[in-house]
Amino acid sequence: MSEAAAGRLDSLKWVVVLALVGGGVYGNSYFGDQPILYRVLALLILALIAGWVASLTQKGSDFFTLVKGSRMEIRKVVWPTRQETTQTTLIVFVFVIITGLILWGLDSVLGWLASLILG
């Protein structure tokens, strides 16, 4: 199949995806009196079908390849230990408090100076 034919089919697939999403939005409002569980299940099923159709397009395939690559890269990340996370959090907390106190003091002094100047 040529790229032009695949591009036309991709366009048709995206139209189907948009129709599924639009149908889900319309159906959710049309069946607003139905229990929310049924509406959520219907929307999830429509989302899965729309995602599957989108994955059949070139851009959808590229997106899922990117997601798989991202998951592999996340596995390579060296995550901090619990102790490192606690220490870093405490350091940030202390510096936020110190900065807040400095800004409060500066605001008080400048407010006092402004009241002296303005009377």
Image (cartoon, rainbow, N blue to C red):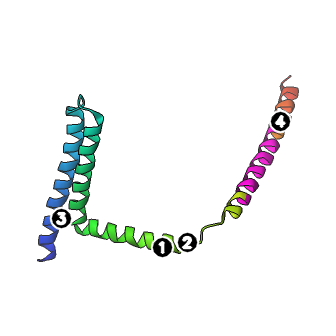
Distance between the Cα atoms at labels 3 and 4?
63 Å
Does residue 62 show up magenta in the picture? no
Residue drawn 82% across and 44% down?
102
The amino acid marked with disc number 4 is: Leu
Distance between the Cα atoms at labels 2 and 3?
35 Å
Q: Which mark is residue 10?
A: 3
Q: Which mark is residue 77?
A: 2
Task: Name the element at disc 1.
Answer: helix
Image depth: mark 2 or mark 3 in front:
2
Distance between the Cα atoms at labels 3 and 1?
29 Å
The amino acid marked with disc number 3 is: Asp
The amino acid marked with disc number 2 is: Val
Residue drawn 20% across and 60% down?
53
Q: Which mark is residue 110?
A: 4
In magenta, the rendered stretch is 87-104
User: Could you say which is closer to the camera, residue 80 or residue 14?
Assistant: 80
